Image: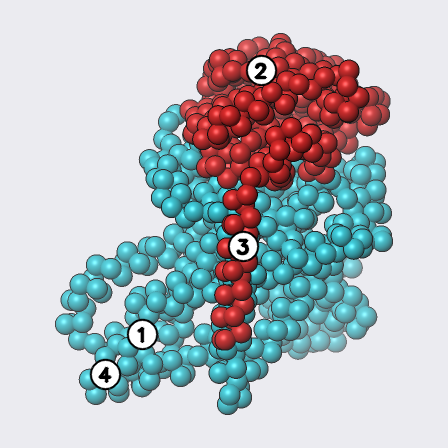
Amino acid sequence: MLSHPRDPALLPRLGWTLVLLALLAPTFVYTHFNPALLLQPETLGTLGHFVAGFFPPAHEAGFLLEVARETITTLAVATAGLGMALFLGAPLAFVTTRALDLPMSAEARRHPLARGLRPILRGLMIGLRGVPEIVWALLFVRAVGLGSLPAVLALGLAYGGMLGKVYAEILESQPDGPTRALTAQGAGRIQVFFWGLWPQALPELVSYTVYRWECAIRASAVMGFVGAGGIGQLLDTSIKMMNGSEVSTLLLVFLLLVIGTEAISALARRGLESRYGSGVLAAAVATAIGASLAWLWPAWAAAGADLKALWPFAASFFPPEMGAAIWGDLARGTLETLAISILGTTLAFAGGGLLALPASGRFGMPAKAATRLLLNALRGVPDLLWAALAVLALGLGPAAGVLALALHTTGVLGRLFAETLENAPPLPEQALLAAGAGRAAAFGHGVLPEVIVQWLAYTLYRWENNIRIAAVLGIVGAGGLGQQLYLALSLFQEKTAATVIVAMLLLSWLAEETSRHTRLRLAH
Amino acid sequence: MSFAKKTFAAAVMLAAASVALAEEAVLRVSAIPDEAPTELQRKFAPLGSYLEKELGMKVQFVPVTDYAAVVTALTSDKIDMAWLGGFTYVQAKERGKVVPLVQREEDTKFTSKYIGSVAAGINSLKDLKGKSFAFGSASSTSGHLMPRYFLQKQNIKPETYFKNVAYSGAHDATVAWVASGKVEGGALNASVWDKLVEAGKVDATKVKVIGTTPTFYDYNWTVRGSLDAKLQKKITAAFLKLDPKNPEHQQILELQRATRFVGTKPENYKGIEAAAREAGLLK
């Protein structure tokens, strides 16, 4: 029991929790988040009606055919997008990685390539991956029209920036013996790369690429919310029309897709271990990218998308709007975004902590299996999809964003928290129990101190991520800066959109810095 | 690899074939998605086959899920004709050469309705102060621009007057949001409101009309400026010929919610353009 008389730390801990809750009060005001609304009879009526429609899932032949077609498109978009990202990211990594100039002399550093070009390319990569893929998709939909082409371009650019950075870091983390030896022999940059780095870095490079492909599939499945094709487009329509049976079919297909992808990527990772595995893998990747392009091409050709339209479109964003009228809107959007991310993450911290107890096996195996399943489902549905569903429950506005972030992040944190619990040394708790402490006190003094720093660090990481997501949830009607971006782009006010994007980038950079500093302080 | 090459080659041929098909005389028509996509298709079907007969060419309806995408498609010649709102017409005119041909007689004196939630006790715009409010799509004339413009005429700036301003995306969605209590008030196209009431899709115990705007010019059928002038004339003639006394025509007019079609001209939309500039939606 919490009120165990012999728990000396109970009062101060409760006190601090209350102080933190008081600090959260403004976020409730800015997001209009009111959990009681979820239990109102009207809400329950709407939701009940909607969910009751889930059974049986829609299965008319025509609809299923459309679902099948759009599912293939979703897969093809993810694969082609990743192909484009590879094309962009690999050369960027090769040029910008420090792994290849480690042993080089001052002469190499004076090379104009190293001095001038690299900072520019690094800046380019930060820009590419700093803008969320759904924002890229929204921009490309405006530039080249609706369809799957904008989705591929969006994934290609955003993931290209990520691959470039992470590949460079993977190369830098390899032992530098072979590189030094080869450089000493007078080998050039390309030779050093292929003989000194490539063989040892390959498994890690492949593993990360495969992971990105899984992410790309989830991202590609929600691109339809901005009109960029795939099953997201069907989901968007079905949710707007409140057609429960179609939504349940689509959710099922989506979950199957995610499970299928995980199986394929496990296979790919294993493939590397055998002798001919990497050859087979390379051939499979090339075929998959070719087949994806072949599947998508007819629609692109029919739409007659001309990429020349991109340049005047890009130019229309400059200079960003700086007029007095925009600052009030921007400040409101920024505060809303901040409040959504803070409240959503805090709720997820509480939810994740509670669910981690059964998920770590503290209440027996059946409870563990059931909670893990729940956590996987919460995590498996992307935030944007949660937001579209939350809008049904809480209405358009920031409150839906809070609920969406809280649900998705609970899934993520619950699993991580459970793992931390399982890895915590069991002895302190056992000793307390043996000494006659109650279960709650034993947990609070034997386990919590072991895990809390790790839990907070995970939560801060997630918050960093969530602030980026909170900034885009408005695209499906869940408040924040995203709504302003969507409005500006709908009204052909590109210069205003440019300012909103800059605000998003600044906010995400500030969050990163704040979180990094706090984590450093936590560690000490 | 060779499999990939083969499929790629096949795809290129397929694409070439589809381009060749597109060069046959086809009129590509679209509409702003101011109602559910299925409803738009249902409304267009008989009008489409009527136009096919009158023009002697294939008419293809291209469904588009986004207002701004219809404007872009028309001004970049990807579609030939579109059903636009007054505001989307002005946006298209700003971005390229387009010609408005005809409109429904009703569009010359269009209005919007302000609606409120019965449960929240909303009887006037005053009751909505500090409450949440839903427009339709941000690009909508009767669901956003004009209701916003006429609010501003009464010194109501939505972003500060209401607690929360949301965009439902479509007129029927706005009614659904107010009826379910998710927002306390909203604004929509008067014609869609009447249609929903007639079809019994509005629960009078949940939603009520709390105001109507003054009249303005709204929807029209617009073609891209580069479309053959003779074809433009034929299209106009086909629309003007629709006669409510002819039962077959009557069905088309009824689905379009029109008594008849009349010609229209760019000057009709000067008022909309001025309102858009004043409301800050056009820069």
Residue occupying image coordinates x 68% and y 12%: B212
Viewer-nearest residue: B249 or B199: B249
The amino acid sitting under disc 1 is Ala
Q: Do dots 4 and 3 share one subunit?
A: no
Q: On the image, numbered disc 1 is attached to which residue?
A: A99
Q: Amino acid at mark 3?
A: Ala
Say few, some or many: other residues with alpha carbon within 10 Å of mark 2 (under 14 / 14 to 19 / 20 or more). some
Give the colour chain A carries in the figure: cyan
As helix, strand or loop, the secondary structure at mark 1 comes to helix
Q: Which image quarter is the N terminus of chain A in?
A: bottom right
Residues under labels 1 and 4: Cα distance? 14 Å
- Distance from Cα at disc 3 to Cα at disc 2: 38 Å
- Measure how far apart labels 4 and 3 are at the Cα level: 51 Å
**Alpha carbon distance from label 3 to label 1:** 50 Å
Quick one: SS at disc 4? loop
Q: Quadrant of residue A91?
A: bottom left
* Callouts 4 and 2 in the same chain: no
Within-10-Å neighbours for mark 1: few <14, some 14–19, many 20+: many
| Whether marks 2 and 1 lie on the same chain | no
Residue B17 - label? 3
> Numbered disc 3: what chain?
B
**Label 3 or label 2, whichever comes before in sequence order:** 3
